Amino acid sequence: MPALQETRAVVTLAPAKPTGLADLGAPLADETMVKKGRVHEFQQLLADGQIGRRFQDLRVVAIKTVEGGIASAKFFVQFEAFGDNTAAPTDGAGFDATVFAGDQPLASLSSSSLFLPYASFWYPNRFVFETPIEIFDQADRLEFIAKPEEVRIVQAGN
């Protein structure tokens, strides 16, 4: 069975204004702080070097805010995924992500599968991870790791 190779993309996080957060439902308070970063597009190759999956508009939004008197920090990882003539298994490998401050890893985040039910179509994916506030305070980048995974090739018209 064909397999996707591990692929990494680095998202640099920078302080940002707390705008454009309505679809995340984040409570906005005077204390709210936001960090954002984005990678426009990257590919995950099959072992034979062909494109097996595409990712676009990988966005990371980190929010530190107060809700109900309790401070919290959350990392939202959002992207669109496209299976280039490949279908993912229903119990796919998903992705890992590591939050960094400089060269020091601060936290590991993981999802067990992507929402990619059919080949040759773009699907939005959104994940949220809660971390200690100290992770938010120190974070300056996130490394997204698309895990290796066996896939099924789907021929056009089938």
Image: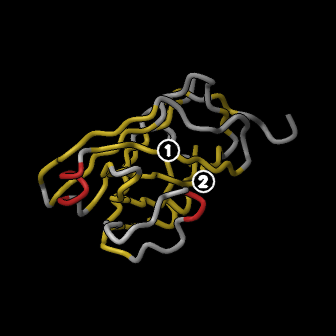
Amino acid type at circle 1 is: Phe
Q: Is residue 39 left or right of residue 155?
A: left
Above or below, 148 relative to 133: above
Q: Is residue 91 left or right of residue 86?
A: left
Which image quarter holds the C terminus? Answer: top right
Rendering coords of residue 94 (x, y %):
48, 34
User: On the image, numbered disc 2 is attached to which residue?
Assistant: 80
Q: Is residue 154 left or right of residue 27?
A: right
Which image quarter holds the N terminus? Answer: top right
User: On the image, numbered disc 1 is attached to which residue?
Assistant: 127
Instruction: Please name the residue shown 35% across and 56% down the image.
Output: 66
Instruction: Please name the residue shown 55% across and 46% down the image.
Output: 50
| Circle number at residue 47 | none
Q: In the image as oriented, which residue stretches furthest toward the bottom?
A: 17
Residue 11: quarter of image: bottom left
Above or below, 63 relative to 91: below
Instruction: Please name the residue shown 45% across and 45% down the image.
Output: 128
Residue 101: quarter of image: bottom left
Disc number lying in front (1 or 2): 1
Q: CA–CA distance between discs 1 and 2?
A: 12 Å
Observer-nearest of 13 and 128: 128
Rendering coords of residue 133 (x, y %):
23, 51
Rendering coords of residue 109 (x, y %):
34, 39
Above or below, 108 relative to 141: above
